[in-house]
Amino acid sequence: MPSATIKIFLAHGEPKRLRTAELSNWTGKAVAGPRSEFEGVIGREESGSSGVYFLTGNDPESGKPAVYIGEAENIRDRVKAHLEKDFWNQIVYFTSKDENLTKAHIRYLEGKLIDQARQAGRALVINGQSSGAKMPESDREDMEIF
């Protein structure tokens, strides 16, 4: 893998609060923060874009780490529907800086991420089913790099 630079911005100067991350030569952007700062995290401009998101916390029954992985054409609108889920205490979402992620792209990414999370076995995957989308080979390869 070629060298890269990761740029992390701590919006409030603290690493456990709202933060963004960018990787050199990557069209994506990550935004993360605690549930206690939900309005600030989804109030960012990036949350109006399409992308994939992770809600993480602990499963209330087992106490083990848990994750929900989703996709949305508008992350802000979609994640508001997850406020009734009590297990999560962190949100992380990934968008594209060039706004080139289509519905098929994000469904493909969601499916791959769910499969990878299940295979890793490090957390209980809350998703009831996998997702995914059929795409041309060139688009699949682009999403593998993303």
Image (spheres, rainbow, N blue to C red):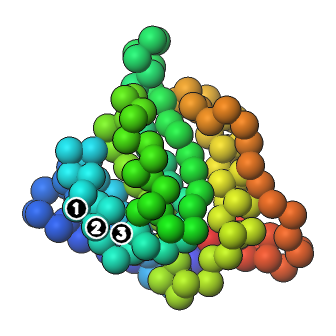
Q: Amino acid at mark 1?
A: Gly
Compare marks 2 and 3 and give the one earlier in the sequence: 3
Of residue 1 and residue 62, the one placed in the foreground of this image is 62
Q: Where is residue 12, by image quadrant?
A: bottom left
Q: Find the distance from the CA under tag 2 to the CA under tag 3.
A: 16 Å
Where residue 16 sits: x, y (%)?
A: 21, 49
Please identify, in this view, whether the residue under mark 3 or under mark 1 is nearer the observer: 1
Badge number at residue 130: none
- Tag 1 and tag 2, C-beta contact below 8 Å: yes
* Image depth: mark 2 or mark 3 in front: 2
Residue 2 falls in which quadrant of the image? bottom right
Residue placed at 44% from the left, 27% from the top? 65
* Residue 75 in view in this figure: yes
| Residue of label 1 | 40
Tag 3: amino acid: Ala
Give the percent coordinates (x, y) of residue 63: 40, 15
Residue ID at (53%, 40%): 68
* Residue drawn at point x = 37 percent, y = 41 percent: 83
Judge the density around disc 1: few (<14), some (14-19), many (≥20) Cα neighbours within 10 Å. few
The answer to whether residue 132 is above or below residue 125 is below
Circle 2: element type:
loop
Question: At 40% across and 51% down in the image, what residue appears?
Answer: 80
Question: On the image, numbered disc 2 is attached to which residue?
Answer: 43
Q: Which residue corresponds to mark 3? A: 21
Residue 39 vs residue 20, the one in the foreground: 39
Compared with 105, 113 (above or below) is above
